[in-house]
Image (spheres, grey):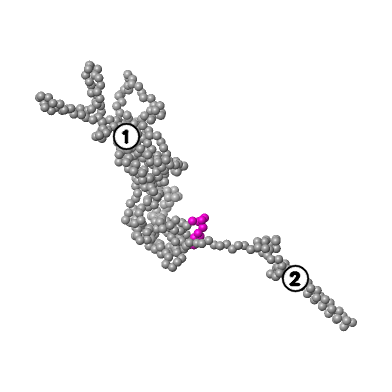
Amino acid sequence: MGAGGGRRTGVILIVLILIVLVIGLGAVFLISSSGLLGGGGAPAVPGAGVADGGDVELPTPTPPPVINIIIANRDIPRGARLSEQDVTILAWPEIAEAPLPAEALIVGREEGSPGLEQVNDRIARVDILKGQPISNFMLTPGDEPTSLGDTGSDAALLIPSGQVAMSLPITNKHGLVAYALRQGDHVDVMMSFRLTDVDEEFQTGLPNEGIIVSSTADFPINSFRYVLGRTTSSPLGDSVVLVIPSETTARPRQSTQLTVDNAIVLRVGDWPFTDINQPIVITPAPEPTVDPAQPTAIPPEQGGPPPDQPTPTPTPIPAPTSVTLVMSRQDALVMKYALETGAYIDLVLRSALDDEVQNVTTDTVTLDYILNFYGVDVPPRLPVSHEPRINLLTINSNIGAGSDLLGSVLPPGIEAVPPSQ
Protein backbone atom coordinates (compact mmCIF):
# COMPACT_ATOMS: atom_id res chain seq x y z
CA MET A 1 0.00 0.00 0.00
CA GLY A 2 2.80 2.44 0.82
CA ALA A 3 4.61 1.93 -2.47
CA GLY A 4 1.46 2.26 -4.54
CA GLY A 5 0.40 5.46 -2.77
CA GLY A 6 3.82 7.09 -3.47
CA ARG A 7 3.58 6.31 -7.17
CA ARG A 8 0.11 7.84 -7.41
CA THR A 9 1.33 11.00 -5.67
CA GLY A 10 4.24 11.36 -8.10
CA VAL A 11 1.94 10.99 -11.08
CA ILE A 12 -0.36 13.69 -9.72
CA LEU A 13 2.58 16.11 -9.28
CA ILE A 14 3.79 15.48 -12.82
CA VAL A 15 0.30 16.12 -14.18
CA LEU A 16 0.04 19.43 -12.22
CA ILE A 17 3.44 20.57 -13.46
CA LEU A 18 2.43 19.84 -17.05
CA ILE A 19 -0.82 21.82 -16.60
CA VAL A 20 1.08 24.83 -15.21
CA LEU A 21 3.55 24.72 -18.11
CA VAL A 22 0.74 24.58 -20.67
CA ILE A 23 -1.02 27.58 -19.04
CA GLY A 24 2.23 29.54 -18.90
CA LEU A 25 3.08 28.87 -22.54
CA GLY A 26 -0.43 29.93 -23.54
CA ALA A 27 -0.15 33.18 -21.59
CA VAL A 28 3.23 33.99 -23.19
CA PHE A 29 1.79 33.33 -26.63
CA LEU A 30 -1.19 35.59 -26.00
CA ILE A 31 0.97 38.43 -24.64
CA SER A 32 3.44 38.28 -27.50
CA SER A 33 0.58 38.21 -30.03
CA SER A 34 -0.92 41.43 -28.56
CA GLY A 35 2.43 43.28 -28.87
CA LEU A 36 2.69 44.23 -25.20
CA LEU A 37 6.17 42.76 -24.99
CA GLY A 38 7.46 44.44 -28.14
CA GLY A 39 7.28 41.21 -30.10
CA GLY A 40 5.18 40.35 -33.14
CA GLY A 41 1.59 41.42 -33.60
CA ALA A 42 -0.04 44.54 -34.97
CA PRO A 43 2.18 47.63 -34.88
CA ALA A 44 1.24 50.56 -32.61
CA VAL A 45 -0.82 53.29 -34.25
CA PRO A 46 0.69 56.75 -33.62
CA GLY A 47 -1.72 59.03 -31.83
CA ALA A 48 -4.03 56.14 -30.83
CA GLY A 49 -5.55 56.52 -27.39
CA VAL A 50 -5.52 54.07 -24.54
CA ALA A 51 -9.03 52.92 -25.45
CA ASP A 52 -7.75 51.91 -28.90
CA GLY A 53 -4.96 49.84 -27.42
CA GLY A 54 -2.13 51.93 -29.01
CA ASP A 55 0.78 54.11 -27.76
CA VAL A 56 0.37 57.94 -27.26
CA GLU A 57 3.14 59.82 -29.10
CA LEU A 58 3.20 63.66 -28.43
CA PRO A 59 5.25 65.98 -30.72
CA THR A 60 8.33 67.50 -29.12
CA PRO A 61 7.95 71.36 -29.01
CA THR A 62 10.72 73.42 -30.58
CA PRO A 63 11.74 76.37 -28.36
CA PRO A 64 11.79 79.77 -30.12
CA PRO A 65 15.11 81.56 -30.61
CA VAL A 66 16.04 84.06 -27.91
CA ILE A 67 17.95 87.34 -27.65
CA ASN A 68 19.93 88.17 -24.52
CA ILE A 69 18.99 91.61 -23.20
CA ILE A 70 20.06 93.56 -20.13
CA ILE A 71 17.57 93.99 -17.27
CA ALA A 72 17.85 95.67 -13.87
CA ASN A 73 19.09 93.45 -11.07
CA ARG A 74 17.65 95.85 -8.45
CA ASP A 75 15.51 98.96 -8.20
CA ILE A 76 17.58 101.76 -9.72
CA PRO A 77 16.55 105.33 -8.77
CA ARG A 78 16.78 108.21 -11.21
CA GLY A 79 20.23 109.78 -11.04
CA ALA A 80 22.07 106.64 -9.91
CA ARG A 81 25.34 105.72 -11.62
CA LEU A 82 25.26 102.14 -12.89
CA SER A 83 27.77 99.29 -12.88
CA GLU A 84 27.68 95.67 -14.03
CA GLN A 85 26.51 94.59 -10.56
CA ASP A 86 23.25 96.52 -11.07
CA VAL A 87 22.14 94.49 -14.09
CA THR A 88 21.83 90.94 -15.35
CA ILE A 89 20.92 89.06 -18.55
CA LEU A 90 17.46 87.86 -19.58
CA ALA A 91 16.78 85.53 -22.54
CA TRP A 92 14.01 87.29 -24.46
CA PRO A 93 12.07 85.01 -26.89
CA GLU A 94 11.84 86.18 -30.49
CA ILE A 95 8.10 85.88 -31.02
CA ALA A 96 5.62 88.27 -32.59
CA GLU A 97 3.46 88.31 -29.45
CA ALA A 98 6.31 89.80 -27.39
CA PRO A 99 8.30 92.33 -29.45
CA LEU A 100 11.67 93.44 -28.16
CA PRO A 101 11.55 96.66 -26.07
CA ALA A 102 12.57 99.78 -27.98
CA GLU A 103 16.32 100.49 -27.89
CA ALA A 104 16.90 97.53 -25.58
CA LEU A 105 20.55 96.89 -24.65
CA ILE A 106 21.48 93.55 -26.29
CA VAL A 107 24.28 91.23 -25.19
CA GLY A 108 25.87 89.48 -28.16
CA ARG A 109 26.82 85.80 -28.27
CA GLU A 110 29.97 86.16 -30.33
CA GLU A 111 33.33 86.85 -28.78
CA GLY A 112 33.97 90.57 -28.53
CA SER A 113 30.28 91.50 -28.68
CA PRO A 114 28.91 94.12 -26.23
CA GLY A 115 28.11 92.78 -22.79
CA LEU A 116 27.05 94.07 -19.39
CA GLU A 117 29.77 96.71 -19.56
CA GLN A 118 27.40 98.77 -21.72
CA VAL A 119 25.91 100.28 -18.53
CA ASN A 120 29.17 101.08 -16.75
CA ASP A 121 29.36 104.69 -15.42
CA ARG A 122 26.12 105.69 -17.11
CA ILE A 123 23.44 107.54 -15.13
CA ALA A 124 19.78 106.56 -14.97
CA ARG A 125 17.57 109.26 -16.45
CA VAL A 126 14.39 107.63 -15.05
CA ASP A 127 13.47 105.29 -12.22
CA ILE A 128 14.08 101.67 -13.29
CA LEU A 129 12.36 98.76 -11.50
CA LYS A 130 13.98 95.42 -10.72
CA GLY A 131 13.54 93.05 -13.67
CA GLN A 132 12.70 95.86 -16.10
CA PRO A 133 14.48 95.78 -19.49
CA ILE A 134 16.93 98.68 -19.79
CA SER A 135 16.69 100.77 -22.96
CA ASN A 136 19.42 103.00 -24.27
CA PHE A 137 17.36 106.19 -23.82
CA MET A 138 16.95 105.45 -20.10
CA LEU A 139 20.67 106.15 -19.52
CA THR A 140 22.97 109.05 -20.25
CA PRO A 141 25.36 108.57 -23.18
CA GLY A 142 28.31 106.39 -22.38
CA ASP A 143 30.83 108.95 -23.61
CA GLU A 144 29.32 111.76 -21.49
CA PRO A 145 28.51 110.25 -18.12
CA THR A 146 29.17 113.32 -15.96
CA SER A 147 25.63 114.46 -15.16
CA LEU A 148 22.05 114.42 -16.34
CA GLY A 149 22.44 117.92 -17.78
CA ASP A 150 24.81 116.65 -20.44
CA THR A 151 21.94 114.77 -22.08
CA GLY A 152 19.52 117.68 -22.30
CA SER A 153 16.44 118.56 -20.31
CA ASP A 154 13.75 116.22 -19.10
CA ALA A 155 11.22 118.45 -20.87
CA ALA A 156 12.63 117.41 -24.25
CA LEU A 157 11.76 113.79 -23.43
CA LEU A 158 8.07 114.72 -23.13
CA ILE A 159 7.75 116.39 -26.54
CA PRO A 160 6.47 114.11 -29.32
CA SER A 161 8.68 113.79 -32.36
CA GLY A 162 8.04 116.47 -34.98
CA GLN A 163 6.64 119.01 -32.51
CA VAL A 164 8.09 121.82 -30.41
CA ALA A 165 7.35 123.46 -27.06
CA MET A 166 6.73 127.18 -26.68
CA SER A 167 6.09 129.22 -23.53
CA LEU A 168 3.55 132.03 -23.34
CA PRO A 169 3.43 134.81 -20.73
CA ILE A 170 0.38 134.89 -18.49
CA THR A 171 -0.67 137.93 -16.43
CA ASN A 172 -3.99 136.75 -15.00
CA LYS A 173 -6.14 133.70 -14.45
CA HIS A 174 -8.08 134.13 -17.69
CA GLY A 175 -5.13 132.88 -19.71
CA LEU A 176 -5.07 129.66 -17.65
CA VAL A 177 -8.83 129.03 -17.72
CA ALA A 178 -9.14 130.21 -14.10
CA TYR A 179 -6.03 128.12 -13.19
CA ALA A 180 -7.75 124.89 -14.30
CA LEU A 181 -4.99 123.87 -16.74
CA ARG A 182 -2.68 121.03 -15.82
CA GLN A 183 0.10 119.15 -17.57
CA GLY A 184 -1.30 116.92 -20.30
CA ASP A 185 -4.44 118.98 -20.99
CA HIS A 186 -5.34 119.75 -24.60
CA VAL A 187 -6.25 123.35 -25.43
CA ASP A 188 -7.23 125.52 -28.37
CA VAL A 189 -5.75 128.98 -28.77
CA MET A 190 -8.01 131.87 -29.74
CA MET A 191 -6.64 135.21 -30.89
CA SER A 192 -8.13 138.64 -31.47
CA PHE A 193 -6.47 141.09 -33.83
CA ARG A 194 -7.37 144.78 -33.96
CA LEU A 195 -6.96 146.17 -37.43
CA THR A 196 -6.91 149.79 -38.58
CA ASP A 197 -6.64 151.49 -41.96
CA VAL A 198 -3.25 152.74 -43.11
CA ASP A 199 -1.90 154.52 -46.14
CA GLU A 200 -0.80 151.71 -48.43
CA GLU A 201 2.30 153.55 -49.63
CA PHE A 202 3.37 155.26 -46.41
CA GLN A 203 2.14 152.45 -44.14
CA THR A 204 1.03 155.12 -41.68
CA GLY A 205 -2.29 155.57 -39.99
CA LEU A 206 -5.06 157.51 -41.69
CA PRO A 207 -6.02 160.26 -42.13
CA ASN A 208 -3.04 161.79 -43.90
CA GLU A 209 -1.96 165.41 -43.62
CA GLY A 210 -1.46 167.66 -46.62
CA ILE A 211 0.53 170.85 -47.28
CA ILE A 212 -0.63 173.49 -49.74
CA VAL A 213 2.17 175.54 -51.23
CA SER A 214 1.21 178.84 -52.92
CA SER A 215 3.10 181.82 -54.33
CA THR A 216 1.99 185.43 -53.93
CA ALA A 217 3.58 188.81 -54.54
CA ASP A 218 4.08 189.50 -50.86
CA PHE A 219 5.17 185.97 -49.90
CA PRO A 220 6.97 184.08 -52.66
CA ILE A 221 6.24 180.75 -51.00
CA ASN A 222 3.36 180.20 -48.61
CA SER A 223 2.34 176.84 -47.13
CA PHE A 224 0.02 175.48 -44.48
CA ARG A 225 -0.76 171.98 -43.20
CA TYR A 226 -4.20 170.40 -42.96
CA VAL A 227 -5.73 166.98 -42.50
CA LEU A 228 -6.92 165.35 -45.68
CA GLY A 229 -10.57 164.55 -45.53
CA ARG A 230 -13.41 164.69 -47.99
CA THR A 231 -15.26 167.57 -49.56
CA THR A 232 -18.98 168.17 -49.46
CA SER A 233 -21.36 170.92 -50.49
CA SER A 234 -21.75 173.80 -48.09
CA PRO A 235 -25.24 174.58 -46.83
CA LEU A 236 -24.35 178.31 -47.00
CA GLY A 237 -23.95 178.60 -50.71
CA ASP A 238 -21.68 177.52 -53.52
CA SER A 239 -18.62 177.13 -51.32
CA VAL A 240 -17.04 173.75 -50.61
CA VAL A 241 -16.61 172.36 -47.10
CA LEU A 242 -13.60 170.13 -46.27
CA VAL A 243 -14.69 167.49 -43.76
CA ILE A 244 -11.86 166.21 -41.56
CA PRO A 245 -11.91 163.51 -38.82
CA SER A 246 -12.76 164.55 -35.28
CA GLU A 247 -10.24 162.03 -33.88
CA THR A 248 -6.55 161.91 -34.62
CA THR A 249 -6.51 158.14 -35.22
CA ALA A 250 -9.04 155.78 -36.71
CA ARG A 251 -10.77 153.28 -34.48
CA PRO A 252 -9.48 149.72 -34.96
CA ARG A 253 -11.73 146.89 -36.09
CA GLN A 254 -11.43 143.60 -34.18
CA SER A 255 -11.30 140.14 -35.74
CA THR A 256 -11.31 136.97 -33.55
CA GLN A 257 -10.52 133.44 -34.68
CA LEU A 258 -9.32 130.03 -33.43
CA THR A 259 -5.72 129.84 -34.66
CA VAL A 260 -3.81 127.02 -32.94
CA ASP A 261 -5.76 123.78 -32.79
CA ASN A 262 -5.19 121.03 -30.18
CA ALA A 263 -2.04 122.19 -28.42
CA ILE A 264 -0.85 120.15 -25.41
CA VAL A 265 -0.01 121.71 -22.05
CA LEU A 266 3.53 120.66 -21.16
CA ARG A 267 3.78 122.69 -17.96
CA VAL A 268 1.92 125.38 -16.02
CA GLY A 269 4.39 127.85 -14.53
CA ASP A 270 8.13 128.21 -14.87
CA TRP A 271 10.56 125.31 -14.98
CA PRO A 272 12.88 124.93 -11.96
CA PHE A 273 16.60 125.65 -12.16
CA THR A 274 17.62 122.93 -9.69
CA ASP A 275 19.12 120.67 -12.36
CA ILE A 276 21.39 123.26 -13.99
CA ASN A 277 25.09 122.51 -13.48
CA GLN A 278 24.33 120.33 -10.47
CA PRO A 279 24.64 116.57 -10.13
CA ILE A 280 21.55 114.61 -9.20
CA VAL A 281 21.69 113.42 -5.60
CA ILE A 282 19.28 110.80 -4.31
CA THR A 283 18.68 111.26 -0.58
CA PRO A 284 16.31 109.25 1.61
CA ALA A 285 13.38 110.97 3.27
CA PRO A 286 14.24 112.25 6.79
CA GLU A 287 12.90 110.29 9.70
CA PRO A 288 10.30 112.11 11.84
CA THR A 289 11.72 113.38 15.10
CA VAL A 290 9.95 113.69 18.45
CA ASP A 291 10.64 116.62 20.77
CA PRO A 292 11.60 115.13 24.15
CA ALA A 293 10.50 118.31 25.92
CA GLN A 294 6.91 117.59 24.93
CA PRO A 295 6.36 113.86 25.45
CA THR A 296 2.60 114.29 25.57
CA ALA A 297 2.36 116.02 22.18
CA ILE A 298 -0.38 114.58 19.98
CA PRO A 299 0.90 113.41 16.60
CA PRO A 300 -0.63 115.25 13.64
CA GLU A 301 -2.38 112.12 12.43
CA GLN A 302 -4.13 111.81 15.83
CA GLY A 303 -5.69 115.21 16.07
CA GLY A 304 -3.19 117.85 14.99
CA PRO A 305 -0.83 120.04 17.04
CA PRO A 306 -1.36 120.59 20.77
CA PRO A 307 -3.71 123.43 21.71
CA ASP A 308 -0.89 125.53 23.18
CA GLN A 309 0.99 125.63 19.86
CA PRO A 310 -0.08 128.18 17.23
CA THR A 311 -1.42 126.83 13.97
CA PRO A 312 1.27 127.25 11.29
CA THR A 313 0.45 129.76 8.59
CA PRO A 314 0.34 128.07 5.18
CA THR A 315 2.85 129.39 2.70
CA PRO A 316 1.00 131.05 -0.16
CA ILE A 317 1.62 129.55 -3.57
CA PRO A 318 2.43 132.20 -6.17
CA ALA A 319 0.20 132.21 -9.21
CA PRO A 320 1.90 130.90 -12.35
CA THR A 321 2.96 133.51 -14.87
CA SER A 322 3.57 131.29 -17.88
CA VAL A 323 2.33 128.18 -19.64
CA THR A 324 4.30 125.91 -22.01
CA LEU A 325 2.43 124.38 -24.93
CA VAL A 326 3.43 121.62 -27.36
CA MET A 327 2.49 122.32 -30.97
CA SER A 328 3.71 122.04 -34.53
CA ARG A 329 6.45 124.32 -35.81
CA GLN A 330 4.00 126.22 -38.01
CA ASP A 331 1.69 126.85 -35.06
CA ALA A 332 4.70 128.04 -33.05
CA LEU A 333 5.39 130.61 -35.77
CA VAL A 334 1.79 131.79 -35.55
CA MET A 335 2.15 132.17 -31.77
CA LYS A 336 5.39 134.11 -32.16
CA TYR A 337 3.80 136.48 -34.67
CA ALA A 338 0.79 137.04 -32.44
CA LEU A 339 2.91 137.69 -29.36
CA GLU A 340 5.17 140.15 -31.12
CA THR A 341 2.31 142.07 -32.77
CA GLY A 342 0.29 142.46 -29.57
CA ALA A 343 -2.63 140.13 -30.29
CA TYR A 344 -5.10 139.32 -27.54
CA ILE A 345 -4.74 135.62 -26.72
CA ASP A 346 -6.85 133.23 -24.67
CA LEU A 347 -6.64 129.47 -24.09
CA VAL A 348 -9.74 127.28 -23.96
CA LEU A 349 -9.68 123.84 -22.33
CA ARG A 350 -10.74 120.87 -24.44
CA SER A 351 -12.77 117.91 -23.27
CA ALA A 352 -10.67 114.83 -22.57
CA LEU A 353 -12.85 113.01 -25.12
CA ASP A 354 -11.64 115.37 -27.87
CA ASP A 355 -7.88 114.84 -27.47
CA GLU A 356 -7.61 113.23 -30.89
CA VAL A 357 -9.88 115.69 -32.73
CA GLN A 358 -7.86 117.62 -35.31
CA ASN A 359 -8.41 120.34 -37.93
CA VAL A 360 -11.28 122.10 -36.19
CA THR A 361 -12.71 124.89 -38.37
CA THR A 362 -14.54 127.96 -37.08
CA ASP A 363 -15.89 131.19 -38.54
CA THR A 364 -14.00 134.41 -37.93
CA VAL A 365 -15.96 136.62 -35.57
CA THR A 366 -16.23 140.34 -36.39
CA LEU A 367 -18.78 143.01 -35.52
CA ASP A 368 -20.54 142.34 -38.81
CA TYR A 369 -20.72 138.59 -37.99
CA ILE A 370 -22.33 139.27 -34.61
CA LEU A 371 -24.81 141.76 -36.03
CA ASN A 372 -25.92 139.42 -38.83
CA PHE A 373 -25.64 135.96 -37.25
CA TYR A 374 -27.35 136.86 -33.97
CA GLY A 375 -29.72 139.43 -35.45
CA VAL A 376 -28.47 142.33 -33.34
CA ASP A 377 -30.31 145.51 -34.32
CA VAL A 378 -28.38 148.76 -34.61
CA PRO A 379 -30.24 151.26 -32.39
CA PRO A 380 -31.74 154.17 -34.31
CA ARG A 381 -30.83 157.78 -33.61
CA LEU A 382 -33.38 159.28 -31.25
CA PRO A 383 -34.15 162.83 -30.08
CA VAL A 384 -33.47 161.74 -26.46
CA SER A 385 -30.47 160.19 -24.70
CA HIS A 386 -29.19 159.01 -21.31
CA GLU A 387 -28.38 161.28 -18.40
CA PRO A 388 -25.70 161.43 -17.16
CA ARG A 389 -23.93 161.39 -20.46
CA ILE A 390 -22.08 158.17 -21.27
CA ASN A 391 -18.68 158.90 -22.76
CA LEU A 392 -16.88 155.68 -21.84
CA LEU A 393 -18.05 152.10 -21.63
CA THR A 394 -17.56 150.99 -18.01
CA ILE A 395 -17.04 147.30 -17.20
CA ASN A 396 -16.63 145.28 -14.05
CA SER A 397 -12.91 144.78 -13.47
CA ASN A 398 -13.58 141.29 -12.07
CA ILE A 399 -15.08 140.15 -15.37
CA GLY A 400 -13.53 141.81 -18.36
CA ALA A 401 -10.75 144.17 -17.39
CA GLY A 402 -7.37 142.88 -18.43
CA SER A 403 -8.78 139.62 -19.74
CA ASP A 404 -6.15 139.43 -22.45
CA LEU A 405 -3.30 137.00 -22.03
CA LEU A 406 -0.55 139.55 -22.58
CA GLY A 407 -1.96 142.11 -20.17
CA SER A 408 -2.20 144.80 -22.82
CA VAL A 409 -3.99 148.01 -21.95
CA LEU A 410 -7.68 148.24 -22.56
CA PRO A 411 -8.70 149.49 -25.98
CA PRO A 412 -9.55 153.14 -26.46
CA GLY A 413 -12.95 154.05 -25.08
CA ILE A 414 -13.07 151.31 -22.41
CA GLU A 415 -12.49 152.08 -18.77
CA ALA A 416 -12.18 149.53 -15.96
CA VAL A 417 -14.02 150.44 -12.77
CA PRO A 418 -14.14 148.54 -9.47
CA PRO A 419 -17.28 146.51 -8.79
CA SER A 420 -20.03 148.22 -6.88
CA GLN A 421 -20.10 147.53 -3.15
Residue, disc 1? 194
Residue 83 lies, in percent from the top left, at: 40, 63
Q: Tag 1's secondary structure?
A: strand
In magenta segment, residue 20: no
- Which of the 4 quarters of the picture holds residue 203? top left
Farthest residue in the left direction? Answer: 218
For the residue carrying disc 1, how many other residues have a C-alpha within 10 Å: few (<14), some (14-19), or many (20+)? some
Q: Secondary structure at mark 2?
A: helix
Please give the name of the residue rendered at 30% of the width and 24% of the height, measured from the top-left corner: 389
Residue 80 image position (x, y, % from top left): 39, 59
Q: Residue at x 40, y 46 (%)?
A: 183
User: Residue 155, relative to residue 66: is it above or below?
Assistant: above
Range shown magenta: 90-99
Residue 362 sits above or below residue 384 on the image? below
Of 251 and 265, which appears nearest the observer?
251
Which quadrant is home to the N terminus? Answer: bottom right
Looking at the rendered structure, the number of numbered marks drawn on it comes to: 2
Work out whether 95 lies above or below 230. below
Q: Nearer the viewer, residue 301 or 407?
A: 407
Pick the residue in front: 222 or 418.
222
In the picture, the disc for residue 29 is: 2
Residue 97, magenta (yes or no) = yes
Check disc 1 and give the amino acid type. Answer: Arg
Residue at point 41%, 64% (across, down): 117
